[in-house]
């Protein structure tokens, strides 16, 4: 169980760093991606699938906001929700990085195809909820300078907040943990180097960003909202798998019931939350389920990216989840039939 706890810390640390970097880049490019949104339908599908395939929930939230303002089609929303896997993307990048990248690319392609097919099937019918004035959150430029002058950075550290001090200390400890082989892979491969670079970049972010950005985006959103859930769901999934593998012939049970597991993974994918799906990433990482089941799970589930849609239009929420479920089952069954 000590190894389970250590592995959980490593995964949570990697996801924590990834979330800091993505949050920083998102605010750094505030508004640009919206103003440059390509106006033709295929551009919307590509854009929505790309944003959805990015790890985390920010992309899906933005897509729902654009849809509620009638800036993109219903098919583009479907494309984004097929492409997204929520926080599960971070878990896959931490545990099975090559497979995680492969799945993200496949979800991107499937999202484009299904989004276009959905709009074609609707035959140009317009499906929109009521217009919501709550758009993507913006911040005045004077509050969100992501690279302020040196004197401002110096002032921030001479008047260091508790949040900045805690985040800085955690990232410094993580850096030395990586270098001393206490965190992450022991061998200096591309995975270890990537984690090291990301941790240094995350430390740079904590050093330079203003208090407004650090408190609102990094501390309130990443640390308080995401990190605890990632840690406890990961710890729970790994603990359950440790117990099952020690006490049951799990490999034989799963291999003899793969179609039932495929259906179960797709049904669990309907839950608008990332945590329950971690178990399927863990199963795959231990070679207990085939690629097809993990892919089906990733297609159906969208983390909590669909929760804003549930608030805007429960009917559209259910329709999109039904489409995701159907596509996940069909693609998963096809890939399983082909032997993967």
Image (cartoon, rainbow, N blue to C red):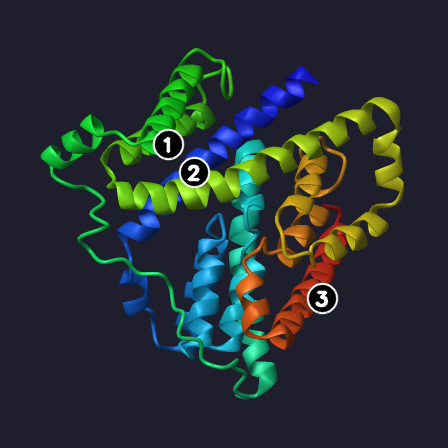
Q: Is residue 9 left or right of residue 143?
A: right
Q: In the image, is residue 152 above or below residue 123?
A: above
Q: Which mark is residue 186?
A: none
Q: Are marks 2 and 1 in contact (CB under 8 Å)?
A: yes
Q: Give residue 220's position: percent from left, percent from top.
A: 42, 44
Residue 219 occupies quadrant: top left
Per the image, the residue denoted by label 1 is 198
State the residue lying farthest toward the top. 180
SS class of the residue under badge 2?
Answer: helix
What residue is shown with label 2? Answer: 18
- Label 2 – label 3 distance at C-alpha: 31 Å
Mark 2 nearby-residue class (10 Å; few <14, some 14–19, many ≥20): many
Question: Does residue 86 appear in this view?
Answer: yes
- What is the quadrant of the N terminus in the image? top right
**Closer to the camera in the image, 151 or 304:** 151
Earlier sequence position, callout 2 versus callout 3:
2
């Amino acid at each position: 169980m000590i190894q389970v706890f250590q592995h959980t810390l490593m995964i949570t640390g990697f996801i924590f760093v990834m979330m800091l970097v993505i949050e920083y880049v998102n605010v750094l490019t505030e508004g640009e991606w919206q103003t440059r949104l390509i106006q033709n339908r295929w551009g919307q599908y590509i854009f929505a699938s790309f944003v959805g395939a990015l790890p985390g929930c920010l992309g899906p939230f933005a897509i729902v906001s654009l849809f509620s303002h009638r800036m993109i089609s219903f098919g583009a929303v479907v494309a984004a929700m097929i492409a997204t896997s929520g926080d599960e993307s971070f878990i896959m990048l931490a545990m099975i990085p090559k497979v995680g990248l492969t799945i993200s690319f496949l979800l991107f392609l499937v999202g484009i195809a299904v989004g276009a097919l959905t709009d074609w099937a609707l035959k140009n019918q317009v499906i929109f909820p009521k217009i919501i004035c709550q758009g993507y959150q913006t911040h005045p430029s004077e509050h969100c300078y992501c690279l302020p002058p040196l004197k401002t950075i110096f002032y921030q550290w001479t008047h260091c907040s508790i949040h900045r001090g805690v985040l800085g200390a955690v990232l410094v400890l993580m850096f030395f943990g990586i270098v001393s082989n206490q965190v992450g892979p022991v061998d200096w491969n591309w995975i270890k180097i990537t984690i090291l670079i990301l941790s240094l970049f995350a430390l740079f972010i904590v050093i330079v960003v203003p208090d407004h950005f650090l408190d609102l985006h990094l501390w309130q959103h990443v640390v308080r909202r995401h990190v605890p859930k990632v840690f406890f769901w990961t710890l729970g999934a790994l603990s359950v798998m440790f117990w099952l593998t020690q006490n049951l012939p799990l490999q034989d049970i799963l291999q003899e019931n793969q179609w039932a597991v495929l259906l179960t993974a797709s049904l669990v994918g309907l839950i608008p939350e990332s945590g329950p799906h971690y178990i399927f990433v863990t199963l795959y990482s231990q070679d207990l389920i085939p690629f097809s089941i993990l892919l089906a799970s990733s297609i159906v589930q969208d983390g909590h990216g669909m929760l804003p849609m549930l608030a805007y239009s429960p009917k559209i929420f259910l329709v999109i989840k039904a489409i995701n479920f159907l596509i996940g089952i069909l693609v998963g069954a096809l890939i399983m039939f082909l032997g993967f």
